[in-house]
Image (cartoon, grey):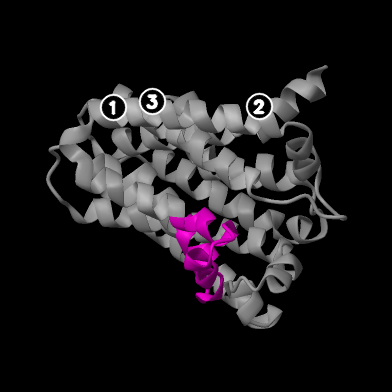
Amino acid sequence: MLKSLFNFLLFSSIYIALCAVIMVWQTNVILGLHYDYLTYNAFVFFSTICSYNFHWYLTPLTASGSERLHWGDRHRTMQIVFYVIGAVGALYFFWQLRMHWLPLTGGAVLTFLYSAPKLPQRAFVWLRKIAVGKTLFLTSVWTYVTTLLPFFISPAPFTWYVVFFTLHRLFLIFAICILFDYRDVESDREEGIRTITTLLPDKHLFKVYYIVLGLSALTALLLWPITTPAVVGTLLAPVLITALLTRKAIRDKSDYMYYFVLDGLMMFSAVLHLLLGCW
């Protein structure tokens, strides 16, 4: 029963939607943003539910399919229901935020581009051939929605700390996406989807990977003047844990490692921040 509940929360994308909301909370606190954050958080939650269920509904079950794919194959009706609920909720809260329609639409386009290569129509198949497309689309949408969009819809003035925090998030998420793509490299090659992992040999790929993690740590340290050492520590924690988990993630390709642990590392600093009361 507990495993069924855990799988439901994980594979229905409720877990990843909560990750996004918690990351937005941390952005608001660190950058000192003031806006209608409850409405925006609801928009992010329902949008994530919608986009992820759409994405997984389009992902076919293969002979060597993962537990998530088998779960999705057994619950296809549920995926459609969650997609519709997410779409309705996202549209409702988009309307509440309609004065910010332009930056919100940018996020929607990025989100769609991530799943678009799975559509069979010729208009979208060509996206599979864009170099590193899948990696960049996913990294960009997560960074944009959880970091830049809150800044764009708030009246806060621009500072370099917005850039540093955005880059910290972008580099960390990009490193995690590299691990995901490395796990999926064979299936991506079969489908003709080009990513950084299909283009680079392992030796060069992991050089890029560790450089990106190092840049995430560096940009976290650059936030020191506007926050506390404890907050900087929470930002560095997922960078260090991701680096330490690299070998295990390469060997252990289970869905729980990737969709629970690695996805959870995106929000880990925010959870630490919240639990430790660092604000």
Q: Which residue is mark 1?
A: 37
Q: Badge 2: how crowded within 10 Å, few (<14), some, or many (20+)?
A: some
150 magenta-colored: no
Q: Badge 1: how crowded within 10 Å, few (<14), some, or many (20+)?
A: some
Residue at image position (67%, 39%) is 260
| Camera-nearest residue between 36 and 246 | 36
- In the image, which is nearer the foreground, mark 1 or mark 2? 2
Q: Which residue is mark 3?
A: 42
- In terms of sequence position, does the residue under pointer 1 or pointer 3 come before the other? 1
Question: Residue 224, can we see it?
Answer: no
Secondary element at image label 2: helix
Secondary element at image label 3: helix
Q: In this rendering, would 180 be left or right of 50? A: right
Q: Which residue is mark 2?
A: 9
In magenta, the rendered stretch is 113-139
| Camera-nearest residue between 156 and 12 | 12
Q: CA distance from mark 1 to mark 2?
A: 24 Å
Q: CA distance from mark 1 to mark 3?
A: 8 Å
Give the residue type at disc 1.
Tyr
Residue 3 percent across, percent down from the top left: 81, 24
Indicate whether 19 appears above or below 127: above
Screen quadrant of the N terminus: top right
Residue 219 percent across, percent down from the top left: 38, 59
Give the residue type at disc 3.
Ala
Residue at image position (63%, 50%) is 241
117 magenta-colored: yes
Secondary element at image label 1: helix
